[in-house]
Amino acid sequence: MSIFDHLGELRRRIIYILIVLVLGMVIGLLLANPAYDYLMAQDPVNKLSLHAFSLWDGIGMYMKFALVIALIIALPFTFFQLWAFVKPALRVQEQRAALGFVPLALGLFLAGLAFSYYVVFPMAFNFTSSVSKHLNLEETYGITQYFTFMFNILIPISLLFELPLVIMFLTKLRIVTPVRLRKMRRLAYFILIVIGTMITPPDFISDLLVAIPLIVLYEVSVLLSGFVYRKQQAADAAWEEEYGT
C-alpha cells in the first residue's frame, strides 16, 4: 500500500471510532440518570446540596456522564481498530497476542476509574472542603462545578492506567525497547510526579499516594516490555536459524 492508501485506511478506522463514540454517548444519555443517582448516594455527596446556577447546568451534567460512559464503551473498540490497522504488519502469533490487548484495555480503564474515584477523589474533595471550612466559608456547590471537578480527576488517571498496555503495544511494534525505557526512567518519573501533583491537592501525602501508583505502573510497563521484547528476540533468533539472515 502507498502512503495515501495507509492514510485512507487510518481515516476509515477513525471514522469507525467516532461513530461508536457517538453511539456510546446516546447510550450514555440513557444511563446518565442511574449513574447520577448512584454517585449522589455516595459520600461525601449525600451530605451536600448541589445547585444549578444556569439553565444549562442540568444538560451539561447529562453530557458529562454521557461522555464518560461513551469513553468506557469506545475504548476497547478503539484498541481493536488500532489492532486492525497494524494487523497486516504483524506475524500471526503477534496478531493473536495483540488482540488480547482489547479486553485488557477495558479492564485497566475500569481499574483506573475505581482507583481515582474511591482513593484520589475523596482526598481532593476533603482537602478543598477543609480549606473552605478553615476560612469559615459556607459550602454551596453548583452541579456543573462539582462534576467537572470530579471528572477532571477521574478521566486523566483512568487514561494513565492504560500506560502498561500502550508500552506493550509499542514494544510489539518495535517502536520502544525496555533498554530505552530504562534510560528514560528519570524523565518518566518526573513527568508522572508532575501529573500526580497537578490532579491532587497541594499536600505531600496526597501527591505521594497518587505518584507512587503511577511510578509502579511505569515499572510494570518496563517489565512487560522486557517480557515482550525477549519473546521477540527468541522468535527472531529461531527464524534466522531456520531461514538465515
Image: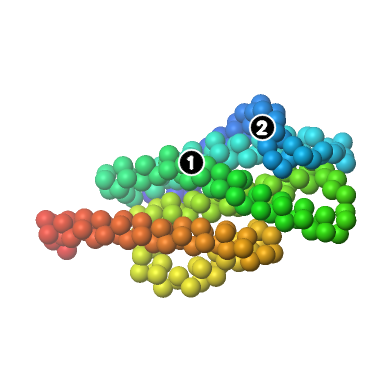
Side of 93 relative to 207 (left or right): left
Residues at marks 2 and 1, CA–CA distance in whole angstroms = 21 Å
> Which residue lies at the image location 46% right of the left edge and 60% below the top edge?
216
Q: Is residue 5 above or below residue 239?
A: above
Secondary structure, mark 1, is helix
Task: Count every numbered label the image shows and give the total.
Answer: 2
> Which residue lies at the image location 69% right of the left edge and 47% below the top edge?
150
Q: Nearer the viewer, residue 187 or 16?
A: 187
> Which residue lies at the image location 66% right of the left edge and 58% below the top edge?
200
Can you identify the residue that label 2 sits on?
Answer: 38
Q: Residue 71's quadrant in the figure? A: top right
Residue 176: % across, % down: 39, 63
Q: Amino acid at mark 2?
A: Tyr
Q: Nearer the viewer, residue 220 or 104?
A: 220
Side of 163 relative to 99 (left or right): right
Q: Nearer the viewer, residue 3 or 138?
A: 138
Indicate how the structure is coloured in the image: rainbow
Within-10-Å neighbours for mark 1: few <14, some 14–19, many 20+: many
Q: Is residue 245 above or below residue 122?
A: below
Secondary structure, mark 2, is helix
Nearer to us of marks 2 and 1 is 2
Q: Residue 182's quadrant in the figure? A: bottom left
Q: Are marks 2 and 1 in contact (CB under 8 Å)?
A: no
Residue 177: % across, % down: 36, 64
Q: Which mark is residue 133?
A: none
